[in-house]
Amino acid sequence: MALADQDMRAAIAVTRFGLGAKPGEIAQARSDPQGFLRAQIRRQGADQPAGEAMTSAQRMAEFREYRRERKDERVEKAQAVQAAAPTSSAPTSSATMDAGPAKREVRDPVKAVGNMLRKDISGDFTARTQLAATTDAGFRERWTLFWANHFTVSATKAITGTVVGPFEAEAIRPNVFGRFEDLLGAAESHPAMLTYLDQIQSIGPDSQAAMAQRRGGRLGGQLQKAVQRTPGLNENLAREIMELHTVGVGGGYTQGDVTEFARAMTGLSIGGERDGVYGQAVFREAAHEPGGRTVMGVRYDQSGKAQTNAILTDLAAKPQTARFVCGKIARHFVADEPSPALVARLEAAWRSSHGDLARVAEALIAAPEAWDPTPAKFKTPYEFIVSSYRAAGAQPQDIRQLAPTLTALGQKPFSAPSPKGWPEDAQSWAAPDAIVKRMQFAQAFSASAVRDRDPKALAADALGERLSPDTAKAIARAESRPEGFALLLMSPEFQRR
């Protein structure tokens, strides 16, 4: 292989398959770009962000306390307002003055718990971004972030927001190089997914719980609450599993299949205080719709949770799932419109290995289509921010360095707008206003990140052989070092991968 070709492949390995180059990283990949990537695949899964890890159950316990305090505050506030009402024996001014301190007293614990939750969620996102900005295994982290987006849970729901970080740590990261079936099962049964897609509200219409409710009986704890909120079937999780996570929109399922699958999944919920496993996934037999189910032409006579597991196993193994998910992998890593040959290679690896994700990752690395020097992917805001930190050899220290910019650019932390996750096509992120905001970030970031370092050297480290002569010349002619680094960040080569 020609030397120039090897240098270009090293740059592609780090900037396309990974999250952007740190100083010296392209040089590390130069001797064997494919081997550099293959070494990042490991059966035990992805790296975990640093910091004090809390489980989803612990986070939900915090959220429970927050809701209790808010309820207590509303009660106390109503009592204070009632006490402050004018009476013949108490002047209005005196009663009002007495009510003020009472209100402040009941607000303090609510504020304390709310601040703790916000701090936890912010800490999760900051730690995740710090890992992305500093890891020596950029491909492993990008592969992980792809799956986190594929199985989106979003902080657009308050209760789900508390467990997005634990969801990635518990369900996604340990399984990204294992079998797709295992990753699918872990993601769909996690408390974050069950709350985000309202599965905890789903009750079989002919289940023991529903019949008891119709007879006027009373159920215990969480089950009683679920029946009161939604005394019937909720199809959200079933629909999104089929539409977004497995076979895809064109995968051959019908609305009837969605309904049958939703009936099979009734009973999947999260534990309440009386269960002794608060905030953990549980199966409530009393809420499960009895009887066999037929989904996509297959009859399932299993009972209870085994029925759901059997359907998930079959969905994971369907050829439609291989085709749909491999197409998404190709679009994420290579191009908005990937070549059919690339998708076919990934699909063949998936089907021959029965959904072994490590084998699929190896097939991606080996595919010649993935090494086309033409950069066809436009970075999302998160990718742009992370790669900027990596180019500077830096990392964010606080959520305040991340959230305002990402929110302004349309990618608010942990808050994908729908179960589809964040879009990845250039059209979604390359609007003129968004480019202006990226430039504003680049200028502000460069002023603090570069200091006395040579932007020409940083550009060579960040892009390697992908650095064009025109961009190199513009950086060299910049009036200041921060301006030169900002030009690098806004260059076409850096904005694309």
Image (tube, rainbow, N blue to C red):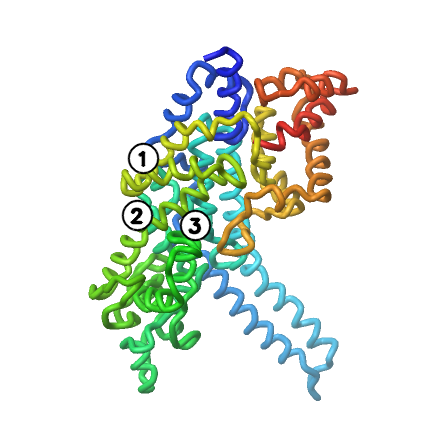
Q: Is 264 or 364 nearer to us in this picture?
A: 364
Q: x, y (%) of residue 146?
A: 46, 41
Establish if 205 lies above or below 303.
Answer: below
Residue that carries the numbered disc 2 in the rendered image: 181
User: What amino acid is found at the position of numbered circle 1 in the picture?
Assistant: Gln
Q: Residues within 10 Å of mark 1 (few under 14, many from 20)?
A: few
Q: Residue pushed farthest right?
A: 479
Answer yes or no: is residue 257 visible. yes
User: What amino acid is found at the position of numbered circle 3 in the picture?
Assistant: Phe
Q: Label 1's element?
A: loop
Q: Is 162 or 1 nearer to us in this picture?
A: 1
Query: In the picture, which quadrant includes the N terminus?
Result: top left
User: What amino acid is found at the position of numbered circle 2 in the picture?
Assistant: Glu
Residue that carries the numbered disc 3 in the rendered image: 151
Rendered image: mark on residue 44: 1
The quarter holding residue 87 reads bottom right
